[in-house]
Image (tube, rainbow, N blue to C red):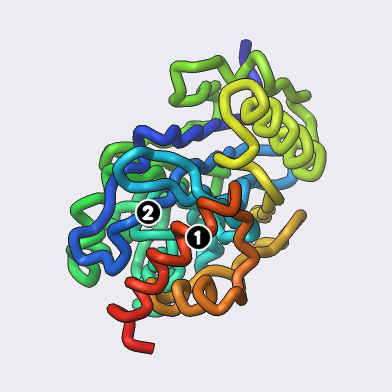
Amino acid sequence: MKFKILLFFIFLLPALLHAQSKDSINVFYKTRGAIMMAVKAKDGIVIVADSRLAYRLSDTGQVLAYQDGQPKIFPLKKFALAIVGNFTDGNITVKKIISDFSNSNPAYNTPEECLYRFGLFIKSKYPAYFKILNNNIIIAAGYCPEPTISILIKNVTHTIRNKDWVSNVSAQMDSLHLYTASKNSTSKRLGDSAEKAMKDYIKIFHTENEMGGFFSALKINPDNSYSWQKNDFSENGYLSECEANHDWFFDKANIHYIDSRSKKLMNEFDKTIKRKCRY
């Protein structure tokens, strides 16, 4: 089959989200579970991602709680990045890393170059997190001048060309089984159908607590301007582990605990982290 619309599924399974920086303040639990997709439509590129972070015990992987509304799509001054993985606990440093990267005014002309510059920036400014970069999957998308989607997987960049059809990177299923689209579909229609496909995938292969929740959809226009089609979570998230823990400890974050035992356990962990953060 040949389609002018291109899609790329990314299902980041729990096994790929085990990394944690040795400099991390929190050594008790980690975040796992994320799903995102990038598609090319006749009127733009759409990136769709879930917003759920699942908190799991570091040793057993047991889910203790989850949180929705976490940003995974980040517009730059040119192009946009979408990231799933674990830079640190709760994905709470990625917002600062991308902000610092954008403010450094990096020079790039293509999504491939954007990913390369981003990697060099992390290596220079955030070396602890660079060591676990191969546990993240990153999308860079934009027009240069044709619509281009590049994906960094295990520190190797793959670019989706104009006439390619690319399935997902998960061996569990073929994205064509859940996702079909007309070659003349609009970005709104593709964004909605992409979200439905990912929700169907979650129902088949995962539990509600692992991934899902509210989805975001960012449209990139041919002039590389952008607009949020659904749920702009870019103002959410945290700039440090201590900032995040402060909200968790004082119940300012909307955390959904699996049961009373899980809540008690996380509260005990947060007390220890609070002492390390000294607030």
Q: Is residue 110 visible?
A: yes
Residue pictured at 24% horizontal, 58% vertical: 21
Whichever of callouts 2 and 1 sits on the residue coming sooner in the sequence is: 2
Secondary structure beneath dot 1 equals helix
Tag count: 2
Secondary structure beneath dot 2 equals strand
Q: Position of residue 66 (x, y in %)?
A: 57, 52
Residue pictured at 74% horizontal, 45% vertical: 43
Residue toward you, 41 or 86: 86
Give the quadrant of residue 128.
bottom left
Residue pictured at 61% horizontal, 76% vertical: 252
- Marks 2 and 1, how far apart at CA: 14 Å
Residue toward you, 227 or 143: 227
Residue corresponding to mark 2: 29
Q: Residues within 10 Å of mark 2 (few under 14, many from 20)?
A: many
Q: Residues within 10 Å of mark 1 (few under 14, many from 20)?
A: few
The image shows residue 157, relative to residue 221, as above or below, that is above
Q: Position of residue 183 (x, y in %)?
A: 74, 25
Q: In the drawing, does residue 163 fall left or right of residue 186?
A: left
Please identify, in this view, whether the residue under mark 2 or under mark 1 is nearer the observer.
Answer: 1
Amino acid bearing label 1: Lys
Q: In the drawing, does residue 99 fall left or right of residue 180?
A: left
Residue pictured at 62% horizontal, 47% vertical: 50
Q: Position of residue 268 (x, y in %)?
A: 41, 65
Work out which quarter of the rendered image holds the N terminus and state it.
Answer: top right
Q: Position of residue 214 (x, y in %)?
A: 71, 51
Amino acid bearing label 2: Tyr
The image shows residue 139, relative to residue 182, as above or below, that is below
Residue corresponding to mark 1: 264
Q: In the drawing, does residue 267 fall left or right of residue 23?
A: right
